Amino acid sequence: MIPGWLNDISRDSWDTFDWKTIPCNREQVREAMDGYIGFVADPYLDDLDEIDFNGVKPSISQKQFIASIMQFNTDLILCYDTIMVMALAMNASLSLLSKQTPRQRLEDFTYDNKDMANLLLQEIVKLDFTGASGKVKFDEKYSRQSNVGIKQYREGNITTIGKYKNDLGIIDWYSGVQWLGGGKPPVDGIKLIVARESMSRVHRLIMWFIAGCGCLTAVAMLVINTAYRNAKAIKISSPALNNFTAVGCLLLYAGVFMFGIDIGISTNVQLLLASCWIRFILLSVGLSLSFGALFMKTYRIHVIFNEALTKMKMTNLQDSKLIGGILLLVFVDIVIFVLWIILDDMQIVKANLEPVFDETNPELEIYLVPEIYHFSSRHSLYFSIALYCYKGFILLWGVFLAWETRRVSLTQLNDSTYIALSIYTVFVTCTIVLPVLYLKGNDVTFTFTFLTTAIIIVSTAILLLVFVPKILLLTKDPESLTISLIHISSSLNSRDTKDTRSVYRKKTEELLHLRRRLMSSGNHESYVTHL
């Protein structure tokens, strides 16, 4: 703020200034000063008839004297009223001094007499009169509550544009303020505006559309698997278990829709909390169904392979038992989430990010403060670790089954290959997604898009790996599908002993004999169905 008494720099008072001490010249400073608004104590009284020294009014000659010194020097007006303050305060203190013990007089005043000084100050605070410089009144800190003149520097001249009348608490404008730079008043500092962050509507609709296409694909696979469940290409791959894989992928796609519900759609806290729980449950159960069904089929192959190779007998592992295993995995998910919901209190937490300058109106100095919302609870870390360990154990089990059945070939339906590809897809996706989300977690739109893309990639990979090969086999001649139970490489490991090779050849011949018996008996389909 520049004081209101600052003169035009083109006047003589600036001639003595050393302009070499600053990196600006006279014209640049003058340009910077143009339009500034200054404030100064206003010692002028508009109407001298208003002067009233606590009931004593000046005579005509005294008014003429006051008017003359106003034109000569404004500081003299302040001196005039200062003398009146001293006179009125001393006059009011006379009676008080006479009542003190011992009795005192003004003539006895010394600068060391603190009692008399405090008495005079108390009387000064009580003063309230209209002097030559306007209203004279003091606050508790002995500061005068005077009127304030409002001035503006306009093209080299200082113009009084208004006055703040302290006693009335109003501003009396003489002329309007001339604002430079478009006629609008400048901002007096930065303005922070909280901007609630929600995901982009366009990104939400795109991901929902893709997830919707995924849902239709899963339903189509489910229909095909059910309609052709008696076809050899579908029957030997356990259509009942394939249905669980399709339903699991369908739940994963549905989770994408739940991730799209945020503060931009609804501000209802209960709805947002419900969507949070539902999205987590859909993802967890969807993974258990899709991978569980795939792993259970491979587990049956693993059991049959071991029984046939070591005990030379058929193993009848019914679908109902495998479905029970899948439901057991889902049951564990449900138990974890029920305990989580009961024992923990999920809340919506608000967080403000670093302010961002709004460049659309830079002259307004507006900073947008992004406000994001996320879900949090006290024990979320422990339950999350439990879920991650549980899902990790399932994937490790799948890796074990894929490795154990790597030599088994079931009519071009070697699910160990699909398990390996599915687990590889999940591993690569998690390896990329988790670090990126940690670094960009505050970007709501990016987080939603990146995470849902990963979910769609995983579910689509599982869906295609399980069903596309079987659909392709439907187009082939059913008689062309061989029913080879086992294909083992004829080459043995160099570390096998001669006895091991002998046993290996014997078991292979017995298995081939078993295959011929199955082919000749005509009852092979009932056995292969369980594979």
Image (cartoon, helix red, strand yellow):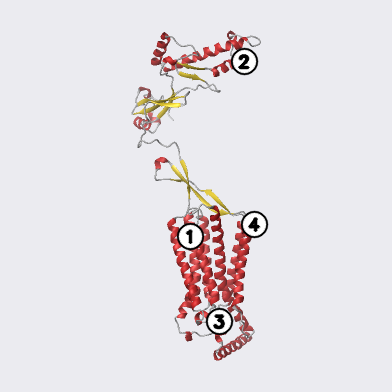
Separation (CA) of disc 2 from disc 3: 114 Å
Instruction: Please tell me which residue is depicted at 63% across the width and 64% down the height of the picture.
Output: 335
Residue 333 visible in the current orientation: yes
Label 2 Cα neighbours within 10 Å, binned few <14 / some 14-19 / many ≥20:
few
> Which amino acid type is marked by label 4?
Leu
- Looking at this rendering, what residue extends furthest in the right direction? 101
Would you say the residues marked 4 and 3 are in contact, meaning their CB atoms lie under 8 Å apart?
A: no
Secondary-structure class at tag 2 = helix
Q: Position of residue 371 (x, y in %)?
A: 50, 49
Q: Is residue 92 above or below residue 507?
A: above
Mark 4 lies on residue? 343
Q: Nearer the viewer, residue 413 or 52?
A: 52
Chain-order first, disc 3 or disc 1 = 1
Q: Which residue carries the number 1 mark? A: 450
Mark 4 vs 3, N-terminal side: 4
* Mark 4: secondary structure: helix
- Please, what secondary structure does the residue beneath circle 1 have? helix
Residue under circle 2?
A: 115
Say which label, 2 or 3, has the lower sequence index: 2
Give the Cα separation between the discs numbered 4 and 3: 45 Å
Q: Which mark is nearer the camera, 2 or 4? A: 4
Amino acid tagged 1 = Phe
Identify the residue shown where x is 33% and y is 29%.
155
Frontmost of labels 2 and 3 is 3
Q: Callout 3: helix, strand or loop?
A: loop
Please give the name of the residue rendered at 52% of the width and 62% of the height, measured from the top-left corner. Answer: 255
Q: Earlier in the sequence, mark 1 or mark 2?
A: 2
Q: Which mark is residue 529?
A: 3
